[in-house]
Image: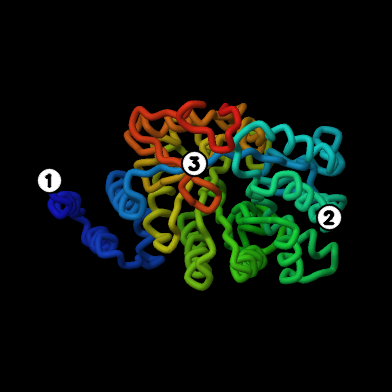
Amino acid sequence: MSQQVEIDIMLSSNALIKSIQYKVFNSERITTEEGLYLYENASLSELAFLANFIREKKHGNRSYFNRNFHIEPTNVCVYTCSFCSYSRLIKKRAEGWEYTHEQIMDIVKSFDEKPVTEVHIVGGVLPKYDLEFYIKLFKAIKQHRPELHLKALTPVEFHYIFKKAKIGYEEGMLRMLEAGVDSLPGGGAEIFDEVLREKIAGGKCSSEEWLRIHEIWHQLGKKSNATMLYGHLETYAHRIDHLDRLRMLQDKTGGFQTFIPLKFRNKDNELSYLPEVSILEDLKNYAVSRIFLDNFEHIKAYWPMLGRSNAQLSLSFGVDDLDGTIDDTTKIYSMAGSEELNPSMSTVELVQLIQQVGRTAVERDSIYNVIKEYQEGDIPNAVQYNFYNLPVV
């Protein structure tokens, strides 16, 4: 069956959705009004078809992952975000952890015999984790293992650090670049609507400040990711507004690599009275994000948040990336009640997870250079693949 025949079969009987479908098939941008209409009116099958059409046009059958680990220097934080199950207030700091420079370097060194390609560093915001602390840390990581991609800190952390150091964003981001930061994660975006952001994340950097820090980073020639926290008090209109602001900045800079929807989890936080949205809502959100963000190359499902089987489902709803091996080095979602209490997958497990749903597993580096593409039945082992000539785990 030809692609055109398949498209004709899938065209909706709804005139507006049919118009949106024609736009997608012709690589035309949909409007914010059309994006909102998809959230409110399109069936899940219609969304899946459109999102998968875009996903396969961009990436074919490929599904990406990398070998990474996380370091979370502290979960003690000066901020009191109502959605957060991870942080511990300063007055409850005995319940948390605060790693020293030496302890963080010990974590980095514990991966010396493993073929990881990325370290991801985010955590709580505390005065003692200041500009000089992070500059010293990042330089030490790069001196110890120069080839390790350093993805570090969110605008929430940068905003606090630079304000404390009495320097502007431009100077601060340049100093981070010089210290060895390679790219920025997407965290801290939460939801951009200013009224709602103040309600769930009051005191943190504003939406404008979050976007400005990423813009400066892009102007320095570097890449970053973007996120959106969904499934709490926001409406579909809030989601589309958030996506639209990201799309506009991407038009301007082209510096975003990946968009990562992050699901609100309701364990042990001030919003625990809210029910979590269903997997069907998760899949809808991935699909609309893929359709709306036409200038983003990648949509990522963070598998420790969704769980393994749901992450597999997402690969049919516009998602082309499942993050990385992680190696049980993050607690942000396990503390919030995710399905993955000890998030860790070997490369073999990740490849098999992807292959089980008929996708081609592709190991990438942090900026999507392909390290290895695994064909059907081809799973990594020490004989087939050894990136650093070190034991594969």
| N-term-proximal mark, 3 vs 1 | 1
Task: Please tell me how crowded label 1 is: few (under 14), some (14-19), or many (20+) other residues with Cα within 10 Å.
Answer: few
Of circles 2 and 3, the one toward us is: 3
| Residue type marked 3 | Phe
Task: Please tell me how crowded label 2 is: few (under 14), some (14-19), or many (20+) other residues with Cα within 10 Å.
Answer: some
Describe residue 89's horizontal placement relative to residue 47 as left or right. right
Q: How is the image coloured?
A: rainbow
- The reply to whether dot 3 and dot 1 touch (C-beta < 8 Å) is no
Describe residue 366's horizontal placement relative to residue 19 as left or right. right
Residue 10 position in % (x across, y down): 19, 50
| N-term-proximal mark, 2 vs 3 | 3
User: Which element carries disc 1, helix, strand or loop?
Assistant: loop
User: Which element carries disc 3, helix, strand or loop?
Assistant: strand
Residue 309 position in % (x across, y down): 43, 30
For the point 64% across and 69% down, the residue is 216
Distance, label 3 to label 1, CA atoms, is: 31 Å
For the point 15% across and 55% down, the residue is 4
In front: 313, or 344? 344
Say how many tags the image has: 3
Vertical comparison of 342 with 66: above or below: above
From the image, tell me which residue sits under label 1.
1
Locate the C terminus by quadrant: top right
- The reply to whether dot 2 and dot 1 touch (C-beta < 8 Å) is no
Residue 357 position in % (x across, y down): 34, 33
| Residue type marked 1 | Met
| Residue type marked 2 | Asp
For the point 46% across and 60% down, the residue is 240
Distance, label 2 to label 1, CA atoms, is: 60 Å
From the image, tell me which residue sits under label 2.
130
Residue 203 visible? The answer is no
For the point 51% across and 57% down, the residue is 257
